[in-house]
Amino acid sequence: MSEDSPRAAAFKPKKSVALSGTPAGNTAICTVGHSGNDLHYRGYDIRDLAAHCEFEEVAHLLVHGALPNEMELAEYKTRLRPLRSLPAAVKQALELLPPTTHPMDVLRSGVSVLGCMMPEGPEHGEAGARAIADTLLASMSSMLLYWHHYARNGRRIEVEAFNDTIAAHFLHLLHGEEPGPEWTRAMQTSLILYAEHEFNASTFTARVIAGTGSDLYSAIAGAIGR
């Protein structure tokens, strides 16, 4: 059949629409674009959260389901602080990563090793999953900055700096001194804005891995790798 024949001109490849409109899943955590260019975490406008909240408040909202009151926030921060420590095996693994490693690959590797040292229990349930999420929230700054200083300068830093917030803890480890309020506020805002964006590729990857019955560390490592 020549390219000029009527049948050739009428032929069009079939567009695959078999999965069009099929839900990938449901989430109560985040909505994007429901009323235009908007982003909400559990019903709260991201602009209000970024303007008035600390990252720990938003983390509590996303992980534990509600914005904490003043007492709950103080208790949450107190619970997170000791979780900034890293097992010796995690530090040793981080020291083996070359300086050329991408920071996201550092976190992926750190999460995987931490999952070996502090494994998920066989029937940990929702409370156990939330506890792992809190541990990862508190310790990821420690992982990244421990590797950063060792890979760049051969220094083994102490990661247990008792700053009040995750944002201040990250900046303190990065620069080696207490950060100013403006820097901390800017870091808080950045962490809040990047905390959740509905079904992006990494979130979808995590849900697929978790949906196969794998452990939470594997789901988070896969999400980071994506």
Image (cartoon, rainbow, N blue to C red):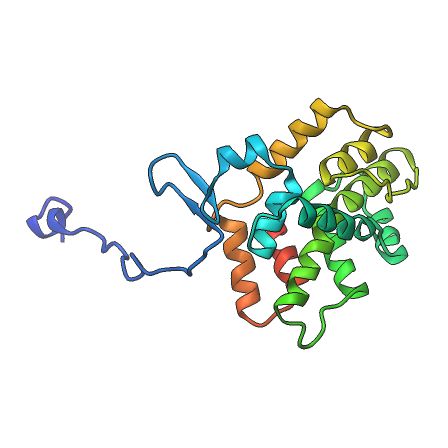
Can the viewer see residue 168 in this picture? Answer: yes
| Closest to the observer, 155 or 130 | 130
What residue occupies the far bottom of the structure in this picture? 122
Residue 92 position, x and y percent, is 88, 53
> Where, by quadrant of the figure, is residue 18 drawn?
bottom left
Residue 121 position, x and y percent, is 72, 73
Residue 45 position, x and y percent, is 46, 38
What residue occupies the far left of the structure in this picture? 6
Can the viewer see residue 226 in this picture? Answer: no
The N terminus - image quarter? bottom left
Question: Going by the image, does 175 lie left or right of 76?
Answer: right
User: Residue drawn at (93%, 37%), measured in percent from left and top?
Assistant: 155
Residue 36 position, x and y percent, is 34, 36
> Where, by quadrant of the figure, is residue 116 drawn?
bottom right
Question: Going by the image, does 121 lie left or right of 3?
Answer: right
| Closest to the observer, 31 or 71 | 71
User: Residue drawn at (76%, 34%), measured in percent from left and top?
Assistant: 168
User: Residue drawn at (49%, 33%), measured in percent from left and top?
Assistant: 47
User: Residue drawn at (90%, 55%), measured in percent from left and top?
Assistant: 88
Q: Say if 100 sits above or below 220 in the image.
A: above
Question: Going by the image, does 72 lie left or right of 33?
Answer: right
Q: How many marks?
A: 0
Q: Say if 105 sits above or below 121 in the image.
A: above
